[in-house]
Image: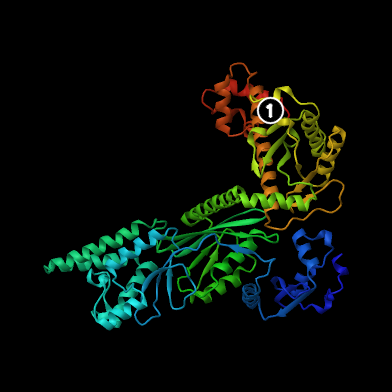
Amino acid sequence: MAQDLAWRPKTGEIPTNPGVYRWLDADGRVLYVGKAKNLRARLSSYFAPLDSLHERTRRMVTRASEVQWTIVKSEYEALQLEFQWIKEFDPPYNVVFKDDKSYPYLAVSIGDEVPRAFITRNREMKGVRYFGPYTNAWAVRETLDTLLKVYPVRSCSSGVFQRAKSSNRACLLGDIGKCAAPCVKRVDVSEHKQIAKNFVDFMAGGDTEHIEALRKRMFAASETEQYELAAQLRDGVDALETVLEKSTIVFTDQTDADVFGIADDELAAAISMFKVRGGRIRGVRGWVVDKEMQRDLSEVVEYIIQNTYSQADADSPREVLVPELPEDAVALARWLSEGRGSKVDLRVPARGDKSALAKTAFTNAKHALMLYKNRRSSDFTARADALSGLQNALDLDNAPLRIECFDISHLQGTNVVGSMVVFEDGLPKKDHYRRFSIAETTDDTDSIYQVLSRRLKYLVEPDPDAVNAEGINKFAYRPSLLVVDGGQPQVNAAQRAIDDSGVKGLTVVGIAKRLEEVWRPHDPFPVILPRASDELFLLQRIRDEAHRFAITFQRTKRKSSIASSLSEVSGLGEKRVNALLKHFGSAKRLRQATAEEISDVAGIGPILAVEIRRQLGDQEL
């Protein structure tokens, strides 16, 4: 029990003030940093009975040997201190950020005496304005090259600039008009700084104003017969419009916002960020975080905001749009506002274009999470590490080269089906998948027993119908490991099926979805695989694949069941049955429809609709 920990502080010793706390192990390493409005209330939740704690919290508590806290004046100060300590100590149980790449930015060193425009992947430089990130390096290079035609700011390195200054000879960019050549005093420092300012203002969102200003100057030059100047201004207008054409217009106003989409599961979260400036998407960034401890969406949002806006940045947006507000949204908004130097609105978009863009960001994040899983699964080294990790964690004699996973699916106890998926060498073996229809069952454990019994009989009595063209019986392959979707009751039922089958030497485990615990038969304590480990990732993927396969079969069975029933109605053929299912989208919605709603389907008259309704009413829902 957690209350038996010798080092646990007395409840009365813990203050009720807001503050930040640190969990430390025996070596003094900081395991976790957190904040609280009320330190006593928050820390007391960690000292509940161990069996009531979330598994990852339980691991952290039992690993720790001390908890320390620091009192602060307000929740806002707690937020600031928590963030500083996370950066300083890098605690293993806080969220781990994994950006899969460094993104190129367009930067302007406005802090320099002679500002310079350049491309960089380093966002740590002071006195520099950043624009982006860009997903492709060629895109930012093309943008810079185009803008230099209009705003000829210096883009050379310090060495090149000093050599040109000492020799009093401009470089090629100065000769072709892509640099104002402050090195040879074609413009003075103040004029060049104004050019750099115009460059920055355009990139920061003053799109239309800059183009219109150039267009007015072009017309004025033309009227005064300064045709060469008018042509240069015309080329400048074309160049700026070319840059804008590459930025998707998302809003008619001058919206200034960062829009976040987040897709997560038990182990990781994928984030997609759309950077909107002046009503246009200026950059897109995506990355993945590992969740060492259980995190709800609001907690993930908080850590993402802290990581993204870790430095004061004048390019921070006026709005930060997230899928869910964290508990301390007010303090976070204040922190963002101080970093930007003006008010920042942190909110969830409810409707309109911003809500639509948030959905697009979520779609991108969902796709990124899928790619992250697929790429990790296809990595040979990761698969080898996963199989080796499972061998060690489950005390197997050999690495489980063939893993079979079973799942049960039903709709309120009806149309019960089972699925079997097979992974060999960490990859799916789809031609070995199998589906099971279960006619009668009492509960999930009975269903697991039936499915395992039917599968195991092929190891005892090979099925001649399962032999393929090469004469190989694919169901006679002996699995190295059996996995069931569920906790100890399901695992015990699976072990009973193995014992009754007479097959010896098989190992079965279950993986419980809520806590990702691995259960062995008749063992009161689960096996806890390390978070973000390859072995847990592999088991999770196999379990999810079995679940998907079972759900697909169950839905197909429901549709075929209602189709068979409707085919008994006189005058209702296959085409009309398909039209009904297509119109209502699912068998469930068709069962719930009234005769009037059914008659709205093309080809279904009122009399036939009444007969269909009667036929559906005779069935058990």
The colour style of the image is rainbow
Which residue occupies the foreground of this view, 254 or 301?
Answer: 301
Image quarter where the N terminus lies is: bottom right
Which residue occupies the foreground of this view, 458 or 322?
Answer: 458
**Toward which corner of the image does residue 617 lie, by quadrant?**
top right
Residue 605 at least partly seen: no
Provide the residue designation for mark 1.
472
**Toward which corner of the image does residue 115 lie, by quadrant?**
bottom left
**Toward which corner of the image does residue 66 lie, by quadrant?**
bottom right
Image quarter where the C terminus lies is: top right
Q: Judging from the image, what secondary structure is the residue with disc 1 in?
A: loop
Image vertical order of residue 72 relative to residue 511, above or below: below
Is residue 195 found left or right of 384 in the rendered image?
left
Is residue 316 found left or right of 504 in the rendered image?
left
Q: Position of residue 160 (x, y in %)?
A: 33, 76
Q: Position of residue 4 (x, y in %)?
A: 88, 69
Q: Position of residue 440 (x, y in %)?
A: 80, 29
Is residue 355 found left or right of 154 in the rendered image?
right
Q: Position of residue 251 (x, y in %)?
A: 41, 58
Residue drawn at the location 38% of the way across and 80% of the way down: 112
Exactly how many numbered labels are in the figure?
Answer: 1
- Residue at the far top: name it: 570
Which residue occupies the foreground of this view, 380 or 455?
Answer: 380
Image vertical order of residue 103 relative to residue 449, above or below: below
